[in-house]
Amino acid sequence: MKLDLSLRGGTIVSSEGRFAADVGIKDGRIAAVGEGSAWDAAETVDCYGLHVLPGVIDTQVHFREPGLTHKEDLESGSRAAVKGGVTTFFDEPNTDPTTTTAEALADKLERAAGRAWANFAFWVGASMDNLDQLGDLESLPGTPGIGEVFMASSTGPLLVADDASLRKVLENGRRRVSIHAEDEDRIVSNRARIRPTHVRQHPAVRDAESSRLATERILRLSRETGRPVHVLHVSTLDELPILAEAKEIGASCEVTPQHLTFCSEDYETLGSKIQMNTPVRSAEHRDALRRALAEGLFDVVGSDHAPHTLMEKAAAYPDSPSGMPGVQTLLPVMLDFASDGLVRVEDVVRMTAENPARLFGVVGKGFVKPGFDADLVVVDLDSVQKVEPSWLESKCGWSPFEGRALRGRIVHTLVRGRFAVREGRLGVPGLGTWVMFD
């Protein structure tokens, strides 16, 4: 068999460990893994001293198209994705118009075709207008299902706050539902009581108790309906034992690099750049998240890439928008954590590739094995990537991680066997296709 490409001499990483092997690629898929000195390949790339990982599946990004493309679009967001080793993304529904109908989903799929650098899928949003249609909507091609279900107001108009409506969401369909767990009533009450004027008050308005209450509520409804849920961007120590107990009913959860990195003290220097929902909280919460990460509680690491322009971010709180870019820095930050001993590279692979594929039924992705798509990222674990504007690809043009030197540099990113990034530089555009789900 003649191969299109051979990656020679690298170390393959999975959740089970590391082993030296060559990777043979043909027609966009992994054709062979092993000793490849006798392979007949059209091209051979030297990967000695480098590690070969399955491409990251980022299950939570906001690429802002349609409607908000002045700060991101599907081309620019996916370009940032591949620069950071992300080969597949699931885009959230809070665009304008929202992705709450079959027509809106089809429009996004058409927009991404031929433009997206990475493979793509689009969440279908739940709203008070489409609760009865969710079972049909989640079965459409190109979507992982229903999410992000907003239990509290966030960026965009989607809101499903009361238990009766949330129960209806969970009763319509069968796929895992992703949840933004904050309690709307408590946040409204906190805002009226505090009357906030500075972003440092953001974690008091959307306090830890609002997250705990909402997580407790959605897990109770999950238990009662038998519908699995995925709790996004966990940010409090209060939720951790609840989520650990909920593993028995099949619940899963996500943490972001932002919540693992920043704490309340950083509002004084970074201001609204680190304003997001759920909020960056005190060091006590951040350190508890880090311990839970090391102990294996989190199933997924997602970026919650949610860019805004610096002009928008400069508005006085509470008018400053929540969200920050993160798709390009997701893997480098996690590899940097691994270099510091907070987590193993094997666990990074588990949370960024294998578990997203398993939990959401992604076909042919998430593993470096024969028969799987050749969506791969080749990294230099000993090399440093400095986060600076010249490296960033997001249209918003900034990152909360700017100035940091992250140990773990992205050398190559392959999407279906072709180089979207080669030697750290952008390669072939438009390689992404829509994701198939089981």
Image: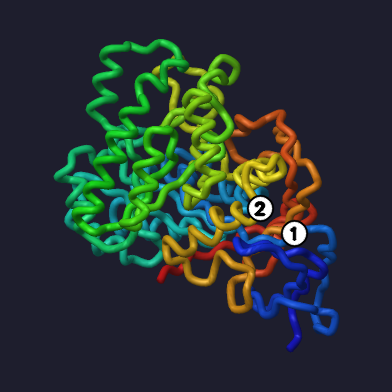
Give the residue type that dot 1 points to: His
Disc 2: which residue: 345
Q: Nearer the viewer, mark 2 or mark 1?
A: 2
Q: Residue 340: horizontal and vertical position, in percent?
A: 70, 40
Amino acid carrying label 2: it is Val
Real-space Cα separation, disc 2 to disc 1, in angstroms: 10 Å
Expressed as whole percent of the image width and height from the top left, the position of residue 363 reads 48, 70
**Residue density around tag 2, few if under 14, some if 14–19, many if 20 or more, within 10 Å:** many
Residue 149, relative to residue 350: is it above or below? above
Q: How many residues crowd mark 1 within 10 Å: few (<14), some (14–19), many (20+)?
A: many
- Does dot 2 land on a helix, a strand or a loop? helix
Q: Is residue 56 left or right of residue 434?
A: right
Residue at 38% x, 33% y: name it. 238
Name, please, the residue furthest toward the left. Answer: 164
Residue 262 % position (x, y): 56, 28
Say which residue appears at 28% left-offset and 47% top-offset.
219
Q: Quadrant of the N terminus?
A: bottom right
Query: Left or right: where does residue 403 sit relative to residue 155?
Result: right
Q: Is residue 158 visible?
A: no
Q: Secondary structure at mark 1?
A: strand
For the residues bearing labels 2 and 1, Cβ distance under 8 angstroms:
yes
